[in-house]
Image (cartoon, grey):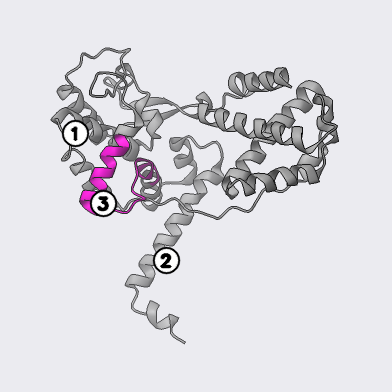
Amino acid sequence: MVEIFKQWSRYITTEKRFSAHTIQSYHHDVLMLLKFLNKHRDDFEDETDFQKLTVADFRAFLAQRRTDGLGSRSLARALSALRSFFGYLDRAKGIKCDALAAVRSPKLPHRLPRPIGIKDSRTLLSSIGDEAREPWIGARDCAVLSLLYGCGLRISEALSLHCGDIAGRDMLIIKGKRDKERLVPVLPVVAKAIGDYLVLCPYPQSHERPLFLGVRGGRLGARAVQAAMQKARYALGLPESATPHALRHSFATHLLGNGGDLRTIQDLLGHASLSSTQLYADVDQVHLMNSYENAHPRAKAKKQP
């Protein structure tokens, strides 16, 4: 069991190139299944016994995890981990378990992205450095968030950049999830924010050094950006949903609202599936209906019986 677990782990790490977070979560979910089977089935002795598992076994496992406090999203992730593991068993070992295919994922609530409004986004970026203890730190935080809102980057993508990635360029090659690369244009206002930060940054710069540095000169961590965002959010009275990642949502929503097409936005965001990008069309539709109901003189009248 230990050896086959290691082989699957190498597969999702080197061949599938899952993110470190996904790998850690998948490891935990599969290990929890193995521990459960060790207690739940007396006849479970080696890898060939995976073929004996039934739908009832998997449902019992999920029920146990629900009892442990897992919500629907975590249970859905656990099922995804098991399907990855059993898919590997089938392909690499010829060990097939048909029962897992019959287990349905729990229904998930349909949650739309929660973008920040255009005016609030601009105000946020112009005031993000007000609470910083040094001017260069404020300029740094503004540059990071400008990349999220102006280029649609994930925070991890922005913080992984090196000075050589940005110097004198109006396009960025971004390495996203599973090392998938995409081209992202750099708006002049974003390039200026980065330039202002580099002028003020007290640490030496080179092509190989991280672009964004912490107070001690090491690579900047996401927590520092989140803390800066939290201070600005409180100062401006923005909701808890106004996080760094919400700026990426805002980038997509505002672009769509101003005539951008879904395919282009999909490429800019680095989404593997168009269905992920289509959520922003739903957000735009909700915004349209809210605007209609708030502004149209007949909207309220039509609601009345």
Mark 2 and mark 3: span between their CA atoms? 20 Å
Mark closest to the chain's N terminus, 1 or 2: 1
Q: Which residue is mark 3?
A: 120
Image quadrant assignment for residue 137: top left
Mark closest to the chain's N terminus, 1 or 3: 3
- Label 2 environment density (alpha carbons within 10 Å; few <14, some 14–19, many ≥20): few
Q: Amino acid at mark 1?
A: Gly
**In this view, 303 is above or below 6:** below
**In this view, 301 is above or below 105:** below
Q: Which residue is mark 2?
A: 289
Q: Position of residue 65 (x, y in %)?
A: 64, 44
Q: Nearer the viewer, mark 1 or mark 2?
A: 1
Image point 39% across, 66% down: which residue? 290
Q: Nearer the viewer, mark 1 or mark 3?
A: 1
Task: Inspect the magenta stretch and tell me whether residue 114 lies in it.
Answer: no
Instruction: Give the residues in magenta.
Output: 225-249
Mark 1 and mark 2: span between their CA atoms? 37 Å
**In this view, 17 is above or below 60:** above
Image point 36% across, 49% down: which residue? 254
Query: What predominant SS class does the magenta segment belong to?
Result: helix
Q: Amino acid at mark 3?
A: Asp
Q: Which residue is mark 1?
A: 138
Q: Position of residue 106 (x, y in %)?
A: 65, 51
- Label 3 environment density (alpha carbons within 10 Å; few <14, some 14–19, many ≥20): some
251 lies left or right of 27: left
104 lies left or right of 69: right
Q: Which residue is more in the foreground, 297 or 107?
A: 107
